[in-house]
Amino acid sequence: MSLWRCAIGDCEARFEDVESAIVHQTNEHERHECQVCGTVVPEGYFAIRHAFDEHTRAEYVRSYDADSSAVRVRESVKDAIEKEVDLRAVVDQLDIEQPV
């Protein structure tokens, strides 16, 4: 079993399952403001998901001064996560961990 690495900035946190990695990214890192539309989302997977589900590749490239290689890397990360993740489990963990 390979470990999932956070990889936000210089964070090297590793997790046995992707759900734990996403919960970590959501709870332990600053939020990300989308450079296309200004929406604030959790950094990491949710920021990548927002960018590619809500905007075109061209908008991403223009707004982030990215190239096709950067797009492919992020799409690859998104695809790898989505092959493994149980998003219901992530939401359930986030609901439990949020202060009342």
Image: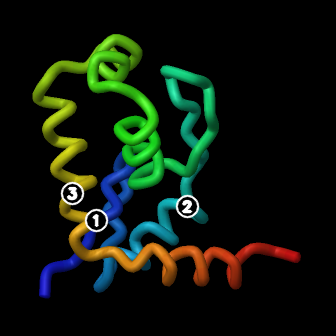
Query: What residue does disc 1 label?
Result: 82
Distance between mark 1 and mark 2 Cα atoms: 16 Å
Distance between mark 3 and mark 1 Cα atoms: 5 Å
Horizontal side, residue 12 vs residue 42: left or right: left
Which quarter of the image is occupied by the C terminus? Answer: bottom right
Please name the residue shown 53% across and 30% down the image.
34
Q: Amino acid at mark 3?
A: Asp
Circle 1 packing at 10 Å, graded few (<14), some (14-19), many (20+), is some
Q: Amino acid at mark 1?
A: Glu
Q: Secondary structure at mark 3?
A: helix
58 to 38, vertically: above or below: above
Please name the residue shown 60% across and 82% down the image.
92
Asked if the residues shown at circle 3 and circle 1 are in contact, with their CB atoms under 8 angstroms apart, the answer is yes
Q: Amino acid at mark 2?
A: Thr
Query: What residue does disc 2 label?
Result: 26
Label total for image: 3
